[in-house]
Image (spheres, rainbow, N blue to C red):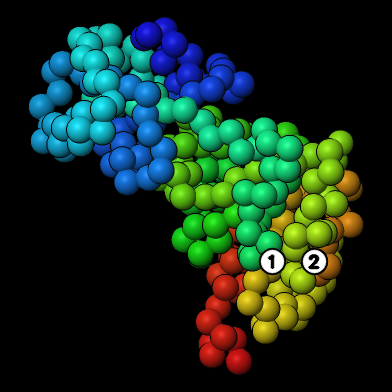
Amino acid sequence: MINTVRKLSRGKHDEAKYFVVEGIKLCEELFASKFHPNYIIISKDSDNTAIDRLVQQFAMQGTKVYETESWNFERLSATTTPQGIVAVVAKRTHYQSANKFEELLPNRSFIILDNMSDPGNVGTMIRTAEWFGIKQVMLYGNCANEYNSKVVRATMGSIFRMRIVHINHTDSSFYYIKKYFHKLNIYAADVNVDASLSDICNYDDNAFGLIIGSEAHGISKEIAPLITHRFTIEGKGQAESLNAGVALGISLFHLCKDKKEKK
């Protein structure tokens, strides 16, 4: 069991049926979500009332709870300062269905992360999207898996409340994007254009799509035909580009402004 959790914690099994949730805050978010852990492991030396409360809550749901020595717990933890609690949770399998887009809400706002391989960045962007009320995320190409332990930690619990699907150009994803989101403007940040977001944004949009490309390669050519509006984020310094997560936050701040404020 310990070796299995160690491998899951270190992202060795992206194709596994389970993922790891570690720490008090994330386990509290897990308990409040629709996800249910297969089992919990706690450190015997843990002396924390929050962990005791979580153990009682999960146990009342029928979740098995195991204890292990502190030195053994440190072996399975992927963090430098383990908090003494880890949950092993079954992944949702909607993306394996015949039409994964049935999980999404048509013509509601969404973001597409295009080939974002850094798990910390992906997790932060999922968290940022939820902050601005965006509940739908598509991961295109070589994106870090949402169940990667670093992604899960960086989301700070948002992972449990988001609708996430994986897309690529070899399946029917683009057909369904055009079908499900045909009413929406789809924006993309592009350092090679002159128009700012305020210049091209339709502030009457109740919903929109936003594509964020990787810092190294920009927007993939396969996904580019989905874009209806390109914009640049204006700056004053000499830095070559913005971090993708920062670009997402700035973009969503403007796109999600209250209508009265926009006018």
Q: Amino acid at mark 1?
A: Asn
Q: Is residue 219 left or right of residue 33?
A: right
Compared with 196, 238 (above or below) is: above
Q: Secondary structure at mark 1?
A: loop
Where does the image place residue 160, in percent across and percent down from the top left?
45, 44
Q: What residue is at 36 percent from the left and 15 percent from the top?
A: 76
Which quarter of the figure has residue 143?
top right
Where does the image place residue 82, in percent across and percent down from the top left?
28, 25
Quarter of the image where the C terminus is located = bottom right
Which quarter of the figure has residue 84?
top left
Report the disc number at residue 244: none
Q: Which residue is mark 1?
A: 107
Q: Is residue 215 visible?
A: no
Gap between marks 2 and 1, in whole Å? 7 Å
Compared with 119, 74 (above or below) is: above
Q: Nearer the viewer, residue 86 or 75?
A: 86
How busy is the neighbourhood of tag 1: few (under 14 within 10 Å), some, or many (20 plus)? Answer: some
Q: Is residue 1 visible?
A: yes
Q: Which residue is mark 2?
A: 182
Q: Secondary structure at mark 2?
A: loop
How busy is the neighbourhood of tag 2: few (under 14 within 10 Å), some, or many (20 plus)? Answer: few
Q: Nearer the viewer, residue 71 or 18?
A: 18
Q: Amino acid at mark 2?
A: His
Q: Is residue 31 left or right of residue 4?
A: left
Q: Nearer the viewer, residue 111 or 220?
A: 111
Where does the image place residue 106, in percent across and percent down from the top left?
68, 62
Q: What residue is at 38 percent from the left and 45 percent from the top?
A: 33
Which circle's residue, 2 or 1, is located before the other in the chain? 1
Q: Is residue 243 left or right of residue 2?
A: right
